[in-house]
Image (cartoon, rainbow, N blue to C red):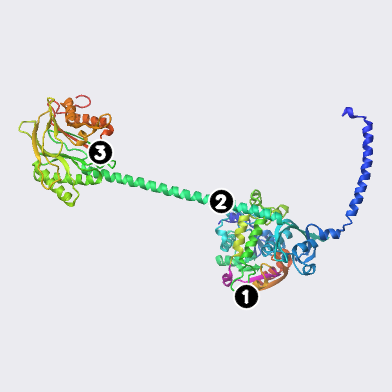
Amino acid sequence: MMCLTGEEPESTLGENEARHGTEQDAELDAAFTVLLEDSAEELYESAPCGYLSTMLDGTIAKINATLLDWLGLRREAVVARMRFADLLTVGGKLYHETHFAPLLRMRGELHGIALEMTTAGGGRLPVLVSSVIKHGSEGEPLLVRTTVFDASDRRAYEQELLRRRHEAEQARAEAEQARAEAERARAEAERARRQAEADRAELADALAALQQALVPTSLPVVPGLETAVHYHTASPVRLGGDFYDLFRLDERRWAFFLGDVSGKGPQAAAVTSLTRYTLRAAALLDPEPATALTTLNAVLHERYAADGDPRYCTAIVGIAEPAADPGCITIRLASGGHPPALLLRADGQTDFLPTPGGMLVGALPTAVFTTAETTLAPGDTMLLYTDGLTEARTGPRRDSLYGEAALRAFAADLAPAGPQQAINALTGLLTSFGDGLDDDTALLALGVPALGSQTRPTPDGT
Amino acid sequence: MAAMDVRRRNNITITGRADGPVVVLAHGFGCDQNMWRLTVPALAREHRVVLFDYVGCGGSDLSAWSRQRYSSLEGYARDVAEVCEGLDLERVTFVGHSVSAMVGVLAAQLVPDRIGALVMVAPSPCYIDEDGYRGGFTAADIDELLVSLESNYLGWSSAMAPVIMGNPERPKLGQELTNSFCATDPDIARVFARTTFLSDSRNDLKSVTVPTLVLECSQDVIAPREVGAYVHAAIPSSRLVTLAATGHCPQLSAPEATSQAVLDFLSALR
């Protein structure tokens, strides 16, 4: 600022320029004056917008040439003959009556209302309308002045926006509908899943009840005899084809059996059920083990083979009763095609109880069964098993069978052993087979407790 | 519903002589209770004047609006019935403009003890031409109106709506008020427009037994004179008065003549 102070030459120059500017303004004013000889009347008539003035009741008192031209109307047909609303489409008339006129009356002015006018040719002219009420000196309304703008382009743009908005709304509605449908489908799937779970639980309960009808949940206590059992099922529905039972015949005698029906699953379970209850009934009627097997053979053959659906089983049926020697138990058993019982003697000797030549039960109309007898002295244990044990696949490639010889060697290492001890060891053996054990396996051990161990040791050693 | 609730919901205004006979003024499609502002002073001198906004309009509680209820005139008639019940009004003179004239007929069916007389201002029981009846419009015309509604949001914006609608103590008529006048949520306006112009209440006219004034305008695009004659003929207890007024809103274009006609009718009732 300081350095500019007193720079006279610049200041003088500025005054010269100002004078020069005034002369130029005068010339421009003259040019404008020529242009503005375009009269107010001319300006009104030919303005780039429509003008009209109406009485308070809407009667058109004055209208400019521009609007008449747009509408294709003649002045004589309009002035004092038409109302403003007459220029509008029907929808526009409705809108005028319900919104435009009340608003104008309330506010005294109204701007930029979108309406459509009808042209003499039947066309439509989108317009933007602004109106102002002119009041008299007392404030009383006198007339309405209105300007009209051609809004064709603007309306096309707005229509496009509206169209886009409708499309967006529709897309949103469709998306919402799709979401709702997906939600319904999800709920339905969830409902089906719950139902399936409920069905599965119900089925599992039914299967458990059925399974208990095939093998006893626990064995009865037999005086002078210790028993132990293990059942392994390879079936996912828990219905095995192996069976066993132990039950009392009278004051002295007990019957037992263990076997294996052909096949697996529900059909095998049906055979198992028939087999179990047939054997129980037959043993009660006639305690001779071979007779029970003969009865079972007839029943199975009649029920299945005669119908062209042969089903059969292997089984060992036996009777246990006190022997003449005190503390000993006599076992008399018969086998129908079943692997021989294994005896683990108190002295460590281990032998099969051979029952050669016994035939499959139910395969033929008549069958021959082999009977054998032995006595269990204190410390002796008899093991019955199904071929799930001896036919378990072993070896690194699971391509060889475990076999009776290996079982006998295993038992020989074990003996002497009580029934529970033997079953525990064999359960461990089964576990060690892993996926090589792919069949049902039933194990039933009966033994006379060794002398001096009549009472089982209690946990505290007393 | 409780009095305070309905007062707030329907933005009820009570003015005039507290012990005077009750006149309920009901606005039609388009605007709100301020449609009556030019006629209220004359009516209020001797009468207790009750004004309200239908739910969805003016200063009503927009959250009380439901598409289902307000898609039939019955829903609006329930507003009237609930206003009368909420204020415990009896034997009122119900003045309904435009579609509200028919709403009044339906409300008189709902709460006959509370409505003692009807004034039907520019009424039409059916806007669409049908079976030799001339209402003046076609369904396509109504669609055009809906387009006009979409093209003019008239100051309504979702941002401003709470300010305009949410204030139960509305200021006396001032600039803010006139700015919000006619500002309606476009979705609600569309439903009201369809309900109004697609309704056919001709069969309800014969249910009217109370003294009725049919007030028509000499030049009305929406309710032409032959429709006024139809309404008058259908209601034996009615009197027909034709105002020298143009347009559909005589309470605005000819407020003195309108209030005088209503007052004449009211005095004849006593």
Q: Which mark is residue B233?
A: 1
What span is in magenta? B200-220
**Chain of the residue displaying label 2:** A
Above or below: residue B11 compared with residue A19: below
The spot of residue B191 in percent (x, y) is 60, 59
Identify the element where label 3 is drawn. loop
Mark 2 neighbour density, 10 Å: few (under 14) some (14–19) many (20 or more): few
Find residue A393 and report its image quarter: top left
- In the picture, measured across the screen, residue A286 lies left or right of residue A82, that is left
State the residue at coordinates (88%, 54%): A35
Mark 1 neighbour density, 10 Å: few (under 14) some (14–19) many (20 or more): some
The spot of residue B79 in percent (x, y) is 58, 60
Of callouts 2 and 3, the N-terminal one: 2
Where does the C terminus of chain A fall, quadrant-wise? Answer: top left
Q: Amino acid at mark 1?
A: Ala
Residue wearing tag 3: A233
Q: Is residue B210 magenta?
A: yes
Are discs 1 and 3 both within one chain?
no
Identify the element where label 2 is drawn. helix
Mark pair 2, 3: CA separation = 58 Å
Q: Amino acid at mark 3?
A: Thr
Residue wearing tag 2: A171
State the residue at coordinates (17%, 42%): A313
Q: Is residue A194 magenta?
A: no
Find residue A142 and report its image quarter: bottom right
Mark pair 1, 3: CA separation = 93 Å
- In the picture, measured across the screen, residue A416 lies left or right of residue A107, that is left
| Along the line of sight, the residue nearer the viewer: A221 or A304 | A304
Above or below: residue B231 compared with residue B192: below
Identify the element where label 1 is drawn. helix
